[in-house]
Image (spheres, rainbow, N blue to C red):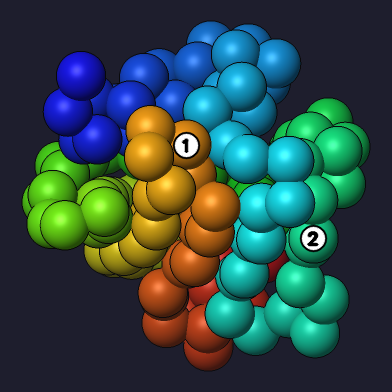
Amino acid sequence: MRLADIVQRGWEALGAGDFDTLVADYVEDMTFIMPGQTDVLEGRQAFRGALDGLGNILPPGFEITGLRQIEGENEVVSILEWRSEKVPGSQASVLFRFKGDKIYEERWFLDTEQWKHAF
């Protein structure tokens, strides 16, 4: 299976609210990094716990309107097009780094000032 297919499966699981399926593709000692936040999540269990509060960390009306994957060696970049109640349209990118067929790092890149305004 291509790494981009694994990432796509994760996005689909996220959209369906199937967080257990999502985290199954991550190593136990994974790292999640979101810009503009002082905390970095360490470990799959912490990441899974944060997913339960996903509605509280996304801007009101958040919606992904487009998604594409770019696959490199042991990594995939997702390009997201998104909008919310206060932001009519924007983009973000997410880097997924792999060990074998499991994700060990997820790192988000977005305009943090725009993100703050979205709330």
Q: Quadrant of residue 88?
A: bottom left
Q: Secondary structure at mark 1?
A: strand
Describe residue 54's horizontal placement relative to residue 106 as left or right.
right
Residue 81 point in image, percent of width and height: 25, 51
Q: Say whether disc 2 or disc 1 marks the residue closer to the N-terminus.
A: 2
Q: Foreground: 73 or 9?
A: 73
Q: Residue at x 73, y 41 (%)?
A: 28
Asked whether residue 44 is in view, the answer is yes
Badge 1 density bin: few <14, some 14–19, many ≥20, Cα 10 Å: many
Badge 2 density bin: few <14, some 14–19, many ≥20, Cα 10 Å: some
Q: Residue at x 80, y 84 (%)?
A: 38
Q: Residue at x 66, y 53 (%)?
A: 30
Which amino acid, mark 1? Lys
Describe residue 65's horizontal placement relative to residue 59 as left or right.
left
- The residue that disc 1 covers is 102
Query: Which quarter of the rendered picture does the C terminus lie within?
Result: bottom right
Q: Residue at x 76, y 72 (%)?
A: 40
Describe residue 2's horizontal placement relative to residue 51 as left or right.
left
Measured along the vertical axis of the image, is residue 71 above or below residue 113? above
Q: Foreground: 98 or 84?
A: 98
Residue 115 point in image, percent of width and height: 54, 73
Q: Secondary structure at mark 2?
A: strand
Residue 89 point in image, percent of width and height: 28, 59
Q: Foreground: 67 or 3?
A: 3
Which amino acid, mark 2? Glu
Asked whether residue 59 is in view, the answer is no
Measured along the vertical axis of the image, is residue 87 above or below residue 67? below
- The residue that disc 2 covers is 42
Describe residue 74's horizontal placement relative to residue 48 as left or right.
left
Residues at circles 2 and 1 in contact by the CB criterion of under 8 Å: no
